Image: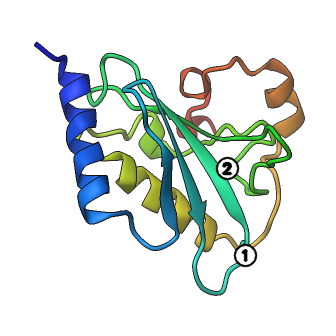
Amino acid sequence: MASISARRLAKELREIEGEGCPVGINLIKADDFATWWFTIEVMGDSLYQGEVHTLQFRFDPQYPISSPAVQFLVTDGRTAPVHPHVYSNGHICASILGNEWSPVLSVVAVCVTLQSMLASCKKKERPVDNDRYVRNAPDNPKKVCRFSDY
C-alpha cells in the first residue's frame, strides 16, 4: 500500500501532466516522490521580467500534512531572485511554507504564490540579515526560515 504522501504526489503529478501548469510555470523533472524541479517566470511587466528561476521541492514522508522544503536553485550559474524574502542561497521566507502551510495547498499553488510574490515586488533587495543567515543556514530551509520571524 502506498503512503499518503506518495498517493498525493502521484495525484498532483497526474494533474500537472494532464492539465499542464499555469503560464510561466514548467515542470522540469519529477521522477520520484522525494524531489521535483520547476521553472518559474513572472509574466507581464515586473522587476523580474525576462528572468527564469528554478525551484526545487523536497518532500518528506509527512507531505501534505507538512510543507515541502522549497528553494530557488543557485548552482550551475543559476542565482536566486533578488527579493526581500529570498536569501542569496535560495531559501525562501514565505508564510505558506511554514506556519501558514495547509494540506489543501498543492505544488502548483506554491509555484503560483511564489510567482505572484515576485510579480508584486516593488524593490529588488535581499533580506536585511542575508549574510548572517546564509553563513549559518542548514541545508533544509523549512526547518530554520519562518516568515513570522521577519
As measured in the structure, the alpha-carbon distance from the residue carrying label 1 to the one carrying label 2 is 20 Å
Image coordinates of residue 48 in percent, x first then y, are 72, 72
Colouring rule applied to residues = rainbow
Q: Decide if residue 17 is on the left or right side of residue 118.
A: left
How many marks the image carries: the answer is: 2
Image vertical order of residue 49 relative to residue 82, above or below: below
Q: Secondary structure at mark 1?
A: loop
Checking the image for residue 85, the label placed there is: 2
What's the residue type where badge 2 is placed?
His
The front one of 47 and 61 is 61
- Name the residue: 67% across, 37% down: 91
Name the N-terminal-most of marks 1 and 2.
Answer: 1
Residue lying farthest left?
A: 1
Q: Closest to the observer: 3 or 140? A: 3
Q: Viewer-proximal residue, 18 or 36?
A: 18
Q: Amino acid at mark 1?
A: Gly
**In this picture, residue 74 sits left or right of residue 121:** right
Residue at point 57%, 79% (across, down): 43
Q: Residue furthest bottom?
A: 45
Question: Is residue 49 among what the camera can see?
Answer: yes
Residue 148: name its quadrant: top right
Task: Kindly identify the residue that appears in the image at 29 percent across and 44 percent down.
Answer: 13
Q: Residues within 10 Å of mark 2 (few under 14, many from 20)?
A: many
Q: Is residue 104 visible?
A: no
Q: Which residue is mark 1?
A: 50
Residue 52, image x, y percentages: 68, 63
Query: Left or right of 69: which side holds 61?
Result: left
